[in-house]
Amino acid sequence: LGTNTYYALFPGTTSCYYQFTISVVKVTEPPVPENAEYCVGETAGALTATTTDPSYSLFFYNTPGGTATSSITPSTAAAGTFTYWVAQGVNGCVGPTATITVTVNPLPELTCPQDISVNNDPGECEAEVEFSATVGLGATLTYTVDGSPITSPYAFPVGVTTVTATAENDCGQVTCTFTVTVTDNEKPVITTT
């Protein structure tokens, strides 16, 4: 390791020579990787890392021990955690690899319940109804009627009410709707005085 100077003599002479230097470098440490996080469908940038010496170049790998490339742009087509590798080197000498982790977060998932039909509660012009939408992991779920927040159970008036469910996470927001129909099935009662 290090730099050495050598001399080459031309055949048949003792005073004419060529001087040259050979430097042997050993890269002993990996670069500092930069992990990345995206949402499904988001445009990803090329993977990055920081070399420990400005004269070093970066080499990226899809698989450990695979073919090196100068750049990799990860796919964001599917949610999950994906691993890539990066090494640094100079003059054909490449050091050990470091791991780059790319996390692709899912868009929010939401499934509304089927439309609900119930009779009114006895003696009331409404019905207390429980309902539940299915939401994906990591998303918050809210319900509204005409823009006002509600929770389950909720006292729905006689008639048809549309409920909007909203699921939201760091990657976006989705909505779906369902209806709650309350039918007044009680016969009127006449009282005399």
Image: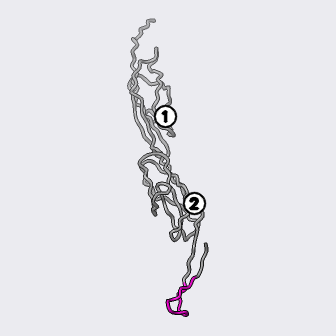
Q: Position of residue 94 (x, y in %)?
A: 53, 65
Q: Which residues fall within the magenta stretch?
A: 6-19
Q: Is residue 109 above or below residue 56?
A: above
Q: How many marks?
A: 2
Between 113 and 4, the one lying in front of the other is 4
Q: Which residue is mark 1?
A: 149
Between 7 and 154, the one lying in front of the other is 7
Of the numbered discs 1 and 2, the one sitting upstream in the chain is 2
Q: Residue at x 47, y 57 (%)?
A: 66
* Image colouring: one colour
Numbered label attached to residue 123: none
Q: Is residue 123 above or below residue 131?
A: above
Quarter occupied by residue 72: bottom left
Q: Which residue appears farthest toward the front when viewing the image?
A: 12
Indicate which label's residue lies in the foreground, 1 or 2. 2
Q: Which residue is mark 2?
A: 32
Q: Is residue 185 above or below residue 82?
A: above
Q: Secondary structure at mark 1?
A: strand
Residue 11 lies within the magenta run:
yes
Quarter occupied by residue 187: top left
Between 18 and 130, the one lying in front of the other is 18
Residue 21 lies within the magenta run:
no
Q: Position of residue 113 (x, y in %)?
A: 42, 29
Q: Which residue appears farthest toward the top when viewing the image?
A: 193
Label 1: how many residues lie within 10 Å, few (<14), some (14-19) or many (20+)?
few
Q: Position of residue 36 (x, y in %)?
A: 51, 54
